[in-house]
Image (spheres, rainbow, N blue to C red):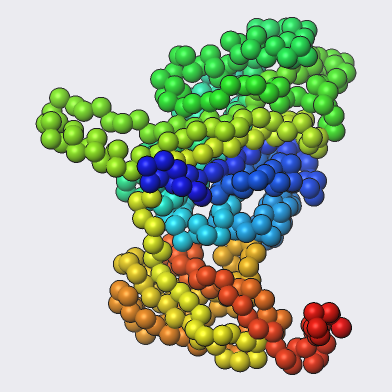
């Protein structure tokens, strides 16, 4: 996050949506996540559809991390990104990663889901969402997989409206999706290109005249009719339709019509099924009952902490071929003024930590929050993957909750200190908030002399490992 205009901060968000069509991931996510970008994002949000969801596979994924999450986590953790949360409903998966430095300022994290497919029971269609407060600004990400087929455009709109109206969050001021200051809506929305024949579609795509197809895109057409859709913005579709491709190719559907099986005899027409849109909460219109003073204060409150959203990139990545869909990527800049910029808890190591020796840490609660004697402080190796990826942890003081700014000291047994040393951070984990509410600066743990003697680490002599 860097400084924007007028004392605001600029946050970069990288969003991916991809229908992976039950395929297993390729190990290299560099292009998809644009890991070589000079300015890395602050948040990564990845929405997948049709993750392998056979009953046996789904149960396995509940026990251990699914293969897609594994690839993204392993790609991002060495670059300082931590998985904040995830939510899965059958084939729908939504992942949120944040730069380590932002973790104490991501609060009130909640996830939920809505089923719309097969009478709402199985969950093969619907939406999953994650919402949170980011430096005091309420943000929601919604990953959807809506009804398929050309003639179901109205059903897709109805399903989306149903998801917006029925998803509830246990937060008094943002109980529903549209109550959030910024909403990002993405997924395999399944809107097709109406009326045009296959030959015209393909010739327009091959000649780069994509604008000839925009007028018949069902989502663009539906936005003209539905007021609630008009609140969502979308960048221009300056990339080829992302569905439907032959696998492991850049060639649109060449499958042989299977009319002899009684199946649809038509090739699938190319379409922009995979989309990313956003919405900034509209300012409330003053009612006739509101007096001038009330409406003015509301406007001032709205303007005191504004959020400006700019889309920097909206494209697809043709290099991935494991699915019949191509992934779609959008990057955004959020210009915002932080409502707060201090953590709820300050936590620090005391003195020099060395393996094989008892260590001390201190923590102070800086602001009243729902702290608990079940909270704990984890020791994390720099590059950790999730809040549960700690080397060891200690419980906070168990006999009473702390006073504000009270400095509390806790000892860490020498048997819990990693022998190999290295760069670490301490993180205060709130069980009620289910998030890290305070992080120390990174610090060095000196390696154990015993570990060197026993050959667990190479001895360094004159800068040369012996």
Quadrant of the image containing the C terminus: bottom right
Residue 151 lies, in percent from the top left, at: 62, 15
Above-or-below relation of 448 to 326: below
Q: Image quarter for residue 4?
A: top left
- Measuring 32% from the left and 48% from the top, which residue is drawn there? 172
Q: Image quarter for residue 121?
A: top right
Residue 291 lies, in percent from the top left, at: 11, 31
Above-or-below relation of 240 to 92: above
**Would residue 45 be found to the left or right of residue 278 on screen?**
right
- Measuring 42% from the left and 36% from the top, which residue is drawn there? 308
Task: Specify whether residue 53 is in view.
Answer: no
The one of 16 and 174 positioned closer to us in this rendering: 16
The one of 289 and 111 positioned closer to us in this rendering: 289
- Measuring 55% from the left and 19% from the top, which residue is drawn there? 219
Determine the residue located farthest toward the front in the rendered image.
462
- Measuring 78% from the left and 36% from the top, which residue is drawn there? 320
**Would residue 8 be found to the left or right of residue 98 on screen?**
left
Above-or-below relation of 133 to 455: above
The one of 232 and 266 positioned closer to us in this rendering: 232
Task: Specify whether residue 200 is in view.
Answer: yes
Residue 175 lies, in percent from the top left, at: 37, 44
**Would residue 6 be found to the left or right of residue 12 on screen?**
left
The one of 293 and 435 positioned closer to us in this rendering: 293
Residue 448 lies, in percent from the top left, at: 70, 88
């Amino acid at each position: 996050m860097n400084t924007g205009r007028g004392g605001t901060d600029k946050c970069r968000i990288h969003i991916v949506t991809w229908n992976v069509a039950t395929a297993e991931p390729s190990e290299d996510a560099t292009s998809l996540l644009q890991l070589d970008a000079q300015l890395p994002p602050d948040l990564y949000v990845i929405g997948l559809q049709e993750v392998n969801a056979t009953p046996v596979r789904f149960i396995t994924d509940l026990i251990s991390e699914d293969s897609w999450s594994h690839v993204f986590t392993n790609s991002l953790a060495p670059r300082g990104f931590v998985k904040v949360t995830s939510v899965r409903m059958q084939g729908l998966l939504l992942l949120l990663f944040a730069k380590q430095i932002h973790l104490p300022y991501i609060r009130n994290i909640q996830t939920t889901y809505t089923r719309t497919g097969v009478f709402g029971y199985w969950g093969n269609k619907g939406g999953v969402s994650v919402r949170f407060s980011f430096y005091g600004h309420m943000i929601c990400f919604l990953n959807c997989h809506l009804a398929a087929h050309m003639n179901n455009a109205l059903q897709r709109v109805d399903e989306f409206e149903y998801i917006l109206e029925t998803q509830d969050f246990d937060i008094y001021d943002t109980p529903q999706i549209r109550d959030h200051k910024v909403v990002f809506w993405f997924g395999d929305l399944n809107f097709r290109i109406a009326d045009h024949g296959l030959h015209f579609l393909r010739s327009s795509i091959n000649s780069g005249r994509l604008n000839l197809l925009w007028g018949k895109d069902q989502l663009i057409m539906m936005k003209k009719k539905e007021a609630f859709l008009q609140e969502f913005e979308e960048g221009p579709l300056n990339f080829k339709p992302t569905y439907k491709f032959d696998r492991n190719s850049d060639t649109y559907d060449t499958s042989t019509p299977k009319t002899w099986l009684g199946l649809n005899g038509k090739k699938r027409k190319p379409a922009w099924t995979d989309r990313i849109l956003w919405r900034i909460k509209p300012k409330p219109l003053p009612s006739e009952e509101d007096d001038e003073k009330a409406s003015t204060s509301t406007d001032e409150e709205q303007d005191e902490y504004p959020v400006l959203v700019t889309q920097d990139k909206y494209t697809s990545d043709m290099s991935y071929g494991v699915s019949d869909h191509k992934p779609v990527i959008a990057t955004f800049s959020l210009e915002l003024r932080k409502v707060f910029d201090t953590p709820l808890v300050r936590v620090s190591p005391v003195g020099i930590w060395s393996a094989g020796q008892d260590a001390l840490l201190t923590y102070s609660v800086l602001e009243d929050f729902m702290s608990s004697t079940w909270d704990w402080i984890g020791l994390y190796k720099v590059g950790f993957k999730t809040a549960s990826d700690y080397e060891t942890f200690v419980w906070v003081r168990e006999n009473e909750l702390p006073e504000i700014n009270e400095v509390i000291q806790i000892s860490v047994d020498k048997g819990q200190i990693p022998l190999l040393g290295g760069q670490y951070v301490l993180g205060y984990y709130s069980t009620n908030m289910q998030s890290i509410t305070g992080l120390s600066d990174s610090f060095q743990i000196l390696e154990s002399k015993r570990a060197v003697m026993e050959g667990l680490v190479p001895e360094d002599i004159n800068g040369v490992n012996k």
